[in-house]
Amino acid sequence: MRRADPIRQEQRRQQILEAAGRCFMRDGFRGASISDICHEAKMSPGHLYHYFESKDAIIAALTQAGLAQAAAHFDRVMNSAHPLAAFIEEVANARYGPASQLLVLDMLVESGRVPSIAAILREHSRALRGMLAKLLRQAQERGEIDSSLEPDPTAATLLAIIDGCRAMAVRDPKLARTAGQESVKLLIRRFLKAR
Amino acid sequence: MRRADPIRQEQRRQQILEAAGRCFMRDGFRGASISDICHEAKMSPGHLYHYFESKDAIIAALTQAGLAQAAAHFDRVMNSAHPLAAFIEEVANARYGPASQLLVLDMLVESGRVPSIAAILREHSRALRGMLAKLLRQAQERGEIDSSLEPDPTAATLLAIIDGCRAMAVRDPKLARTAGQESVKLLIRRFLKAR
Amino acid sequence: MRRADPIRQEQRRQQILEAAGRCFMRDGFRGASISDICHEAKMSPGHLYHYFESKDAIIAALTQAGLAQAAAHFDRVMNSAHPLAAFIEEVANARYGPASQLLVLDMLVESGRVPSIAAILREHSRALRGMLAKLLRQAQERGEIDSSLEPDPTAATLLAIIDGCRAMAVRDPKLARTAGQESVKLLIRRFLKAR
Amino acid sequence: MRRADPIRQEQRRQQILEAAGRCFMRDGFRGASISDICHEAKMSPGHLYHYFESKDAIIAALTQAGLAQAAAHFDRVMNSAHPLAAFIEEVANARYGPASQLLVLDMLVESGRVPSIAAILREHSRALRGMLAKLLRQAQERGEIDSSLEPDPTAATLLAIIDGCRAMAVRDPKLARTAGQESVKLLIRRFLKAR
DNA sequence: CATGAATGAGCTTTCATTCAT
DNA sequence: CATGAATGAAAGCTCATTCAT
């Protein structure tokens, strides 16, 4: 008698999420079909629905996974020797290609129409702003940045800069990888600079 | 037999574009159907296809029109008494609701999948950056802003901030209308400030 | 400029309803697919949905058409020289094959699960009972049947007999066409007989 | 290695049939899925298919069982002190809710499409009519009912009344539990009454 | 110039059934 | 005996697009 193997199950779910990620990256949330994802994940539609109850559920899981990744990322940044410097480096560095940035923008767009995604995004945004605000408070305590800046709106503005960089990567990928990077670093430094 | 009337023809195209704009604003490029647009434009699908050869063509034309409008907007800003101040005011002021901001983000996303839209976007991004760079150069000549900033990358960064504000309007509409606005103004002023 | 032709539209709807009737008769409401109906009606699915917004809507329309037909039928019965005799003849006479009787039974079954069909059936049943009760009252006034019978429950019972005859046609088609018929006539006559 | 245990096997089959009965009662033969039945029977699909080779086989077995139960029921009625009175009481009394009546009607409907079920139904209809005819003959011998009635067609008609009562329970549950009952008793009494 | 009919591929999802363990 | 993974062929429905008038 074979019992359900939760490890294997989790692997399958990951397999689907990765396949979905590739498809969504290529064609967007709306543009990629379940059939595409099945093909990419080498899995029949019936089986895919064994693991996710709907396409929206896949998008939701993927979004949440993205949030978790971002959070982990931030954790590393904040635990590095110079969190602020690391953060600035991170934002400007458009390491991920336009496709990946596009996915986040698509999520923003989708959240404007699909309530379930809107809920996840709201949560996501709140969490990110929270982490950024914490980073800012620490830097203020250390006197690294302007202590008169209000952490919360400032964090929101930094998030806007991050999203803006995504847009830059789409509008002009070349620039985003060269002079744009330096300019963004300057932008953030001047914005936050202790005085 | 009546001959084609180019003026009437152009009016019809505008009518369709306006209807499409409302539909796309409401439901997104993918979410709005040709049927929706026909209904909104009080026009049959057969007739609509007389003016636009495909849905993508409508999106392209709308993108074109939207960007042209933005360019005209900038022109006005630059010809105002205090172009720089007007610009800053303009960016931070999230006058248009999230729906309208969403549409621009949707255009960015769509440009990532549809080459013809990518071409239009690229062209217009270049034009916008050009105008911004010109604005920056003027301000530098007048000594209003830091003269060591390189106009082109700085213009790209300002454009990123504009797009970032759109994202902010989607992520947290309330904040974007209040504290976020002030923070963004501060961001731009500090970035450009003459020293 | 061609205008919508309501006559042609109505013909199309009829064409679909007839095709659906044949399919439902053959395979039942659940068993017959939209695709089957499209094939039978020589029409693409897209077009079919131009005329009916869902499969349930087709079933509903068909049910209502059936009611109208039954009502017309009753009208004729009641306006004949000997309404009561005509009615008895009518009930026993299993003119329509088992397939057609099956369809009504299927409707009963379906109404137990699909609220929209339940609503139509309820309406249908009420109308039929009303007509039967009227017939009974007339016959009582003429002294043709037992005047002590309460029209409403008696009408319900006659309707049960009609449905029972449908079941008989399914259980044993041959008998239903021969000795069963005579027995049912006797049943009704004895039930209603003036005393 | 363990040998097959026929008793345990039979228990399992019963377990499945009971679960299926509940599901079918709730959602109909077509509406209930194998997955539903598995869930209700706390059994995996693979295992279920070990006991029944298809969904139709389950329906067939259930039909068989249901009809066998009805036959047993009749046996009891016929061995009671006053078989005829007991029978009349039985028919009119809509003890089982509409769901249960629905299931029998669904069987009739299904028999119209699935030959294997049609065969079972035919067989059982014959058996039921046989029992009813026997009941009638006994009553005739005792002078309790009209001796001129032909037992076979009369039995078929009584069966039709039984099915008709099921339909009544679906068409108007309230009536079927009140005035309808009395009317049906009257119907049968007048039909059979000795003269 | 304009209509609405008509198409057909494709969408998400379900489900009876089989397979590997 | 028993599990749950896995399949794949539908299902109902939508929609960009073309056609006939």
Image (tube, coloured by chain):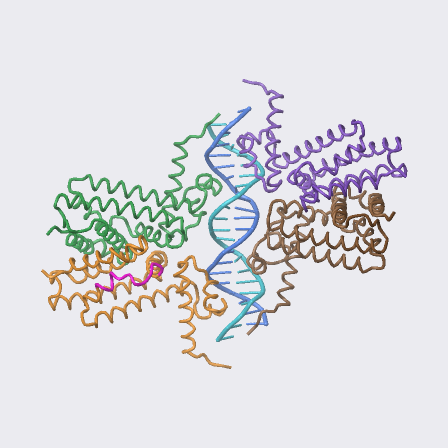
Chain colours: A green, B orange, C brown, D purple, E cyan, F blue
Q: Position of residue D21 (x, y in %)?
A: 62, 34
**The C terminus of chain D, quarter of image:** top right
Q: Position of residue C80 (x, y in %)?
A: 83, 59
* Quarter of image, res C164: top right
Looking at the image, which residue sits at the far front?
C148
- Of B33 and C115, nearer the camera is C115
* In the image, residue C77 above or below residue A44: below
* In the image, residue B187 above or below residue D33: below
Tell me which segment is drawn in magenta. Answer: B88-99
- Of D31 and B11, nearer the camera is D31
Q: Is residue B124 left or right of residue C98?
A: left
* Quarter of image, res D62: top right
Q: Is residue A6 left or right of residue A141?
A: right
Q: Is residue B89 magenta?
A: yes
**The N terminus of chain D, quarter of image:** top right
Q: Position of residue A36 (x, y in %)?
A: 43, 48
Q: Residue at point 24% right, 71% down?
A: B75
Count the marks: how many? 0
Q: Position of residue B62 (x, y in %)?
A: 37, 66
Q: Is residue A127 magenta?
A: no
Looking at the image, which residue sits at the far left?
B195
Q: Is residue B130 left or right of residue A51?
A: left
- Of A51 and D151, nearer the camera is D151
